[in-house]
Image (cartoon, rainbow, N blue to C red):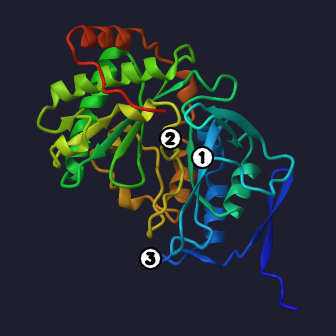
């Protein structure tokens, strides 16, 4: 009979997670293995749980590592232990429901990694009311010919407008080529209104940085040197990588919280599963206080009303 694949048992608080094939190489450029990925998530445990806590979470899985196929998984993978929690969502477009992972403890994250998850993509709402977001997401998405210095300049404008509004933004690298900024909001509005508010904000950034930023809906019409201020990430069931989520890139890059005074100098390529644990041990979770800084969307909804009166409403999008 063939021998069983190698495995290790990982103690995570009061749970034990069995990790199979710990030596499988997931990231070819660095040689990082599945066990390296597990150890990374253990090192930033409080931070990744804070980012995912009670949010429906889509998983990006790589069963054979990055050399194999990528699986976008809404439904919880089969075989979950009874302590792994879920939240049920309804998808009108398909007329179906899905029970998605709902992280409440670090063991659930490590179990998902055992199931070959590399990236965690949570909703911007929580299970108490999945139709009312509590997180407004500003995604600075550079065009194909846009350099990172342009992203940094647009981030400065974002910070300026947030300050004028009295909103506290929490920036992070996207883990790829862009930047994200999260703002906590009260869960009082549906996705449509949060997206309207996000569009009005994006338009103000575009007005202040017309040579660098765009809100153009159609990709074919965007200047490839501009940053798209992507308000669409606030649409229902649109998700982006969580703070502290590893990305499916060969160098094992991480979507990493940074301070505003780091934006001008921070290089996204410097944040990997090998460098972020030391940074985390030194600085802690830079998004730890996000729940204490809640911003009322009322001013932005007034801007949105003005935009609509002037004929500048955002383009429609599906679920």
Task: Please rate how many residues cluster around mark 3, counting C-alpha atoms within 10 Å: few if below 14, some from 14 to 19, many from 20.
Answer: few
- Left or right for 123, reference 12: left
**Near-viewer residue (310 or 56):** 310
Callout 1 secondary element:
strand
Extreme residue toward the left, this view: 211
3 vs 1, front mark: 1
Residue at 24% x, 24% y: name it: 203
Toward which corner of the image does residue 111 lie, by quadrant? bottom right
Instruction: Find the distance from the CA under tag 3 to the CA under tag 2.
Output: 27 Å
Report x, y in % for residue 318: 44, 32
Position of 224 compared to 297: left or right? left
The disc at residue 173 is: none
Report whether 166 appears left or right of 245.
left
Q: Are marks 1 and 2 in contact (CB under 8 Å)?
A: yes
Observer-nearest of 56 and 295: 56
For residue 58, which numbered disc appears in the image?
Answer: 1
Q: Name the quadrant containing residue 158.
A: top left
Residue at position x 15%, y 44% from top? Answer: 223
Q: Is residue 214 left or right of residue 244?
A: left
User: Residue 130 at what x, y percent from top left?
Assistant: 63, 26
Image point (33%, 48%), residue name? 178
Position of residue 164 relative to residue 151, above or below, is above
Please name the residue that numbered disc 2 is placed on.
Answer: 239
Residue under the point 70% across and 62% down: 115
Q: Secondary structure at mark 3?
A: loop
Residue of label 3: 29
């Amino acid at each position: 009979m063939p021998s069983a694949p190698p495995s290790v048992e990982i103690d995570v608080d009061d749970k034990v997670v069995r990790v199979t094939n710990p030596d499988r190489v997931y990231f070819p450029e660095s040689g990082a293995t599945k066990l390296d990925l597990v150890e990374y998530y253990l090192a930033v445990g409080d931070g990744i749980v804070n980012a995912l806590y009670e949010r429906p979470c889509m998983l990006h899985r790589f069963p054979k590592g990055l050399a194999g196929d990528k699986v976008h998984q809404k439904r919880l993978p089969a075989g979950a232990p009874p302590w792994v929690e879920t939240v049920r969502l309804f998808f009108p477009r398909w007329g179906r429901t899905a029970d998605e992972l709902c992280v409440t403890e670090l063991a659930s994250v490590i179990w998902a990694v055992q199931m070959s998850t590399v990236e965690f993509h949570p909703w911007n709402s929580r299970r108490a009311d999945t139709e009312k977001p509590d997180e407004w997401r500003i995604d600075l998405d550079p065009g194909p010919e846009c350099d990172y210095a342009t992203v940094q300049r647009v981030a400065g404008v974002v910070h300026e407008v947030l300050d004028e509004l009295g909103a506290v933004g929490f920036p992070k690298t996207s883990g790829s080529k862009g930047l994200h900024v999260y703002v906590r909001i009260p869960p009082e509005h549906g996705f449509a209104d949060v997206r309207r508010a996000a569009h009005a904000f994006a338009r103000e950034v575009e007005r202040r940085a017309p040579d660098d930023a765009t809100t153009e809906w159609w990709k074919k019409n965007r200047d490839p040197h501009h940053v798209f201020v992507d308000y669409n990430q606030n649409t229902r069931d649109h998700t982006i990588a969580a703070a502290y989520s590893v990305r499916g890139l060969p160098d094992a890059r991480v979507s990493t919280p940074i301070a505003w005074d780091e934006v001008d100098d921070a290089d996204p390529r410097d944040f990997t599963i090998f460098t972020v644990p030391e940074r985390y041990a030194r600085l802690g979770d830079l998004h730890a206080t996000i729940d204490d800084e809640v911003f009322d969307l009322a001013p932005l909804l007034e801007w949105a009303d003005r935009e609509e009166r002037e004929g500048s409403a955002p383009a429609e999008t599906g679920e």
